[in-house]
Amino acid sequence: MEKVAITLNINGQDFDMLVEPRKLLSDAIREDARLTGTHVGCEHGVCGACTVQVDGRSQRSCLTFAVQAVGKSITTIEAIADEDGGYTALQQALHEEHGLQCGFCTPGIIMTFEAYLRENRDPTNEEIRDVLSGNLCRCTGYQGIVRAVKVAAERMRGGKSEGGQS
Amino acid sequence: MKPGRFTYHAPESLDAAFGLLGEYGDDAKILAGGQSLIPMMNLRMARPDHIVDIAAIPELTGISENGEQVTIGSMTCHADIVAAEVLVQRCPILPTAAKFIGHHAIRNRGTIGGSVSHADPAAEWPLIAILLDAGMVVRSSRGERRVQAADFIQSIYTVDLEPDEILTSLVFPVLAADEGWAFQQISRRAGDFAIVTVAVTLALASGGTIERLRLCLGGMDVTPFRLKDVERDATGKAPDATWMDEVAHLAATAGSPESDMHASAEYRREMAAHLTKQALNTAIQRCRGGDG
């Protein structure tokens, strides 16, 4: 089957690649752009590990063909850092609140909530849980992740937080 | 877990899309948001030879209102429906129902037209389209036709769409300012496939009796369906506890739900009764100016 030449813009950089139309965006990111921070779990949209941002909105990279992403601005976990290259408020809070253990699901969770916290600066625990329902985590039991998002949102609004109770 | 091979087409106009669909017929599959089709392709349950991606056709996306109706382009994603102020004002059951679809990332990509054309019996849009008698605008190189939702959605995964046709938009009636409504659903986890869904619109006459009712059930048969007899008989009745018990009983005994890995038929019937009562209560509260 014929491959097509495409250019994907990932994290502000153009990547030229030759792919079959059936190549999933998740595989193009990992294999062709060599950005392996985006993880692949279920490959049918259930687990959320492969979540990236397309034009600033969280999307499943396993439910998109790479050819569909031409002309879009794709953001992956590799681009997530604060202005000085350190942790973002969300990453720092996940670290402090035990929001991860093995880390496999973490890139998907960060890509989901970095986008969500731009839309909703002050989410309730219920709203956080609703959004988090799209990302499976088998280590933490989710409580720490919910706390971390809450703490990160507070810090991003400029408030103080001594660690959350949810 | 990788899809089979296909040839990819991304037409930039409806005419170009009609040309491709005419040429490849049954070998082609329209790709809308891909949130159902791509999982099916990854699982090799679907192996189309040609994919016609309609995302680049501009007139398929957008929401407009003309006083009596709202028109939603088939490629409008669920998240944009959730956020549409005009819908929150004029037909609030639409953004509310959209919040129940899948997860955040799925709603950012999945489309209303894709969902209705796919006709999953557990999906939200077919149910809302049937509840509100939405008009499906279908176009092909042969012209345009309009089909009512209940006729369009024929059976499980089966709709009234020829291989060379595209669902271009959906037309919903707006709700009256004093019309109450409710959308109730039960699933194992937020965003999972629904087990039972009940949607209601209800208007009260000045005396407090029911003026008109719409009541639609999902998860109780191969397609969502309205309880037309209940709707007809409701007019003029007082919306009291006795009436609600009666309607809940009729909802529980309607359709022919199946037992599957998610729930038994008996459980579905119990939930249909429970959710119907909840939905009627919420709709009545909203009629009376409460928040539900």
Image (spheres, rainbow, N blue to C red):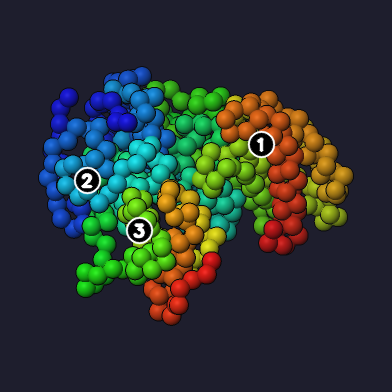
Same chain? Circles 3 and 2: yes
Relative height, residue B2 to residue B77 (above, below): above
Q: Nearer the viewer, residue B22 or B78?
A: B78
Same chain? Circles 2 and 1: no
Relative height, residue A160 to residue B65 (above, below): below
Residue at 62 percent across and 44 percent down: it is B185
Residue B73, given in percent of the width and then of the height, sits at 44, 44
Q: Which residue was labeled with disc 3?
A: A110
The chain letter for the residue carrying disc 2 is A
* Label drawn at residue B217: 1
Q: Is residue B148 visible?
A: no
- Say what amino acid the circle numbered 2 marks: Ile
Earlier-in-chain disc, 3 versus 2: 2
Residue at 41 percent across and 63 percent down: it is A98
Task: Kindly check if marks 3 and 1 are in contact, taking CB atoms under 8 A apart as contact.
Answer: no
The chain letter for the residue carrying disc 3 is A
CA gap, disc 3 to disc 2?
A: 17 Å
Task: Kindly check if marks 3 and 2 are in contact, taking CB atoms under 8 A apart as contact.
Answer: no
How packed mark 2 is, by other alpha carbons closer than 10 Å (few <14, some 14-19, many 20 or more), is: many
| SS label for mark 2 | helix
The chain letter for the residue carrying disc 1 is B
* Marks 2, 1: nearer the viewer: 2
Same chain? Circles 3 and 1: no
